[in-house]
Amino acid sequence: MGKNDYVGGGLFVALGVFIWAMTFQFPGLEGGHPGPSLFPRVLGTLFIFFGALVVYEGWKTREGKEESLPGEEVPLNYFNPILVIILIAAFIALANKLGFIISGVAILFILMTKLRVSLLKRSIVSVALVCFVFLVFSKLLRVPLPIGLLGW
Amino acid sequence: MDFLIQGLGLLLAPKVLLVICICSLYGLFVGSIPGLSATLAASLLIPFTFFMDPVPALVSIVTMSAMAIFAGDIPAALVRIPGTPSSAAYTHDSFALTQQGKGEMVLGVDVVFSAIGGLMGAVVLMTSAPMLAEVAMNFSSFEYFWLAALGLSATVMVSRGSQVKGALAMLLGLFLSTIGVDITLGYPRFTFGSVELLNGISFIPAMIGVFGISEVMRNVMQGEMKFAIARVQAGKIFQGTGKLFFKYKWNVLRSGLLGTFIGILPGAGADIAAWLAYAVSKRGSKEPELYGNGSIEAIIDSGTANNSCLAGDWVPALVFGIPGDSITAIVIGVLFMKGLRPGPMIFEQQPQIIYAVYLAFIVANLLMIPFGYLAVKTSSQMLRVPKNILIPGILMFAITGAFAINNSVFDIGVLGIMGIIGYFMEANGYPVAPIVLGLVLGPILEQNFMTSMIKSDWDLTLFFMRPISAILGTITVIIWLFPFLAAFLEKTKKSRAS
């Protein structure tokens, strides 16, 4: 974890400094006692302390190599998690314009394409699943899902 | 007695019975799929509980979690992968026995002893929670502050991997809880002018993101998982379990009580209960050499402990409003969502709901026998459900569930961001459960601290003046100092040895 710990610990230290900087804008209580700033400042201090500890731990283990057993490694697809986030962002951007059903079917279809589900299967599953979710949330639980182009 | 009958009446309503059946099947399904945890199942269930009355909402979580923790044993026995982390302790033993042709017996033991453990936990919950609630009636903001601090400290102490990283995860949850209007002056903190952030980070989308989206991201990275499923004749799975019960009755009693006690400790969940019961079992066993190579005694002990732990987790959640684990952190969120404030007053004001929860534990664990049998019979089919279809389905439910709470796409953004945070933190060895506990306990911690400070005119010594507050405070401070003391002692030991 060595290098990653530098980055992770450093980010937490930076978050602690940021929290401290922000709290100077917060008002205090009567009598000069800290009010809304007290709890965030305690947290900011602890972020800096523990973040620095993680950096230190990373520095201590920088020479150590992670153990991996031969033959146990599974090929990982690093693009797929990014795709999930892109699809969530696309849903946020499109849901109000296209509606829940079209946006939902689109993101499921794309994700299943990337996960190598056959064309027939992904077409049926994405439409059926989105319709099922729509019926459960919109009709049964009365959630006003975005309507969009289909008008329902 | 009246409240018991009222609770039973609430539980036996047809709608609630239907919820119990559906959530049993849901818990069994999710629990038996490796890679999907009981916490994920609970987080996806919450948007549905939003639309339920308090009793079915709470009962759904009780039933689902009991079934999911048991169902995690099934893939452990059949494919050597635990369905949930709670079954990890005895996975090797389960699979080794399956390979020896005793898979039928293992699955029968899993069903029966999970149910017995769950029932034992329910009995302890029913007896200890009202007594503790009586004590908690005398608590003030000082005691509640220390309880919240103790819960968070214990969570960090028992978190997997580095405790420093556990502390940072907990601090992140606490920081997220400060976003929005503050409690002392009503000043907006860390909102950056966003109207949506004035009410703070919505707990449910954040939780689905941390547990659900991060798990989706991890699963899509691994691609399709195909398992070599061991063949088991699941005909007479209960044959011989009676004999085993009488042979290991003291083990069952010990592990049931140990598991419940672990559950009552804030922050420690079913996985820790199973590992501890396994260690205790091995130490007291006449056949320790079998542990790891196929010990039925290990499975009985750990399987009893992890299910008994579930009811124990509810004790601090109901009595003090302090979650026992990540699932009860979700439960506390649900209680607040339903306008119920967990704590001793709920035992006075809504006792029928508490009794319905007690009875739900008993019903869920009794139902585990037939439902568990059904799950074992259909286990090979459940394990064949293609993950490349299941995972996109979970994504769809997560997005819709996050939207449904406030009917806002902003919450889908929270879901995505929390998913990214959860994913990267787990990938770098940070446990994510403390984030949720921090998010839940943050407002309790800050509110009780500020109330105490204002009450005491900023005199910190008053935190140690009341007897219970002083005890809780001392335990908490010892936990804080423990890593430094341990490091110091180890250094001294090493220097002496050299």
Image (cartoon, coloured by chain):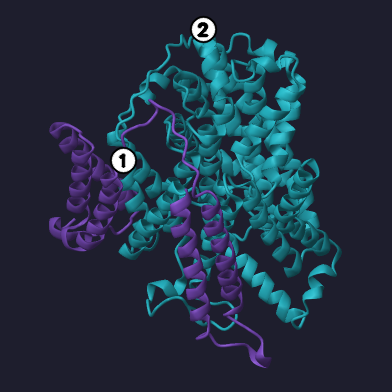
Chain colours: A purple, B cyan
Q: CA distance from mark 2 to mark 1?
A: 34 Å
Q: Quadrant of the C terminus of chain A?
A: bottom left
Q: Secondary structure at mark 1?
A: helix
Q: Label 2 amino acid?
A: Gly
Q: Residue sitting at 43 percent across and 76 percent down? A: B191
Percent of width and height locating residue B415: 37, 57
Identify which residue, B315 or B480, lies in the foreground: B480
Looking at the image, can residue B130 be seen?
Answer: yes
What amino acid type is highlighted by mark number 1?
Val
Instruction: Give the quadrant of residue B258.
Output: top right
Residue B306 position (above or below residue B145): above
The reply, left or right, for residue B56 in relation to residue A115 is: right
Which chain letter matches label 2? B
Compared across the picture, whether B84 is left or right of B313 comes to: left
Q: Residue furthest bottom?
A: A31
Check whether the beta carbons of the residues at disc 2 and disc 1 lie within 8 A of each other: no
Q: Residue furthest front?
A: B498
Instruction: Indicate left or right for B177 with B321 as reference.
Output: left
Residue A128, quarter of the rendered image = top left
Other residues around mark 1 within 10 Å, as few (<14) / some (14–19) / many (≥20): many
Q: Position of residue A54 (x, y in %)?
A: 54, 57
Circle 2 sits on which residue?
B101
Q: Is residue B47 visible?
A: no
Q: Using the image, determine if residue B456 lies above or below residue B241.
A: below
Chain letter for mark 1: B
Percent of width and height locating residue B194: 37, 76
Disc 2 crowd, CA 10 A, few/some/many (<14, 14-19, 20+): some
Do pointers 2 and 1 mark residues of a single chain? yes
From the image, tell me which residue sits under label 1: B220
Q: Secondary structure at mark 2?
A: helix
